[in-house]
Image (cartoon, grey):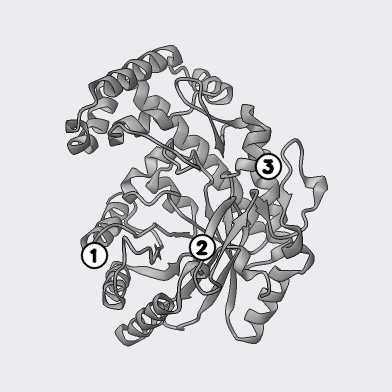
Amino acid sequence: MGYSREWYRGCDANIARSQMQYSGVNSSYHQGRFFHPRSKTFRRLPFSGVSFTPEWSKYNRLRPTVHEPIAQAGILGKMKEACEQAGMGFHTWWVGLHKSTLGLAHPDLCVQNIWGDTYTYALCPSQPEVQHYAKALFTDTLEQVKPERILIEATAFLPMKHGEHHEVCLLPLGESLQWLLSLCFCGACTERAESQRIDVGAVKQHVARLVSQMVDADSHSQVSAEAREVAFLLLEYPELYHYQQSRLEVVDQLWRSLREIAQSLGTALDGFPSSTPFFVNQSYWEGVSLRKAADTLDRVVPLAYGDSVGDVAYTFHAIKLVAPEATLGAAFSLHHNQIQSAVELAARVKTAVDAGAQSIVYYNLGLLNNRRLNWIKQANLAVEEWR
């Protein structure tokens, strides 16, 4: 536990009838700078890395960076042992393609927008080298960490709005503009689309014109009608629709490959539909189909953030519209902009449970003070009373 403050943790409290609890610890993460209130310090992860020593023979061009102190201390193994002694299940939280360290070193393997800008924080899942890396790291993680379940994140196309260091935009970015700027036009994506007889030239022409027109308009009216505008564009431009479908297929195929690996090693596979806290039916920004995700994953775990209990309820409504039989969990953040009290957290958790969530995941416990940690305790106790 000596290094636990240096990496994010989530806690997955299963609320099935057994009332079994789990500890979910991170095995692969991205870089960043994080404030830890209980230790009164900022912790900096200078690179995207893994918390164990890889089996290097599994990898080709892309090779993971290792958080050496954590790996050498065997923190994940000690956590697994501690969970077993405490009668808790052991899960791991795994970030796949959000790897700025690798992206900066291999920009040709990253998402590229219509202007040719490279999103170095986002390895592109269409790239064969990236697919090999994801499957190798996934296998390596399961073989070495040996979790009962693994919760995957960032295994799709990350969107254009990321929150990088000093990221500045002074114009309104509606949903349709952000979606268009999230489309990848790297060589692998365009080749795949062309092989499916999609007119990539027409797609690029439409996207370039639409993006330029939206940027030049600088209109707040875009934002108010943004959800309808995306559907409108997909119906008006069949090429855009088919290009989007090609992206969904890329992600689905990768997830199915990960599922096969997980099944072969006896590990349950859970997944976040998106890596960004927008409404769950906006997961298409990242090339994710909720219907396909529900068919592939053992459990779909949406980020049930939002600004109200109603937003949480809509999260499950949206999934059930396209995947009524999906096995569900829910992930909550105790960010001060989203949760202001223990009562508010408990109400949201109850909404998720009533909607069928079988597990509740609390994000980033290392970034909470004791007051907010106690809110989680109160919410969990409330869950036991409801059941």
| Side of 167 where 68 appears, left or right | right
Whole-number angstrom distance, CA of label 2 to CA of label 1: 27 Å
Residue 330 x, y percent position in the rendering: 39, 64
Specify the label residue 35 is tagged with.
Answer: 2
Assess disc 3: are there few (<14), some (14-19) or many (≥20) residues with their C-alpha within 10 Å of its C-alpha. many
Mark 2 vs mark 3, foreground winner is 2
Specify the label residue 297 is tagged with.
Answer: none
The residue where tag 1 is placed is 309
The residue where tag 3 is placed is 133
In front of the other: 194 or 80: 80
Residue under the image location 34 percent in, 52 percent down: 323
Residue 314 x, y percent position in the rendering: 25, 56
In front of the other: 45 or 41: 41
Quadrant in the rendering for residue 80: bottom right
Instruction: Give the mark, 2 or 1, whose residue is nearer the N terminus.
Output: 2
* Kind of residue indicated by mark 1: Val
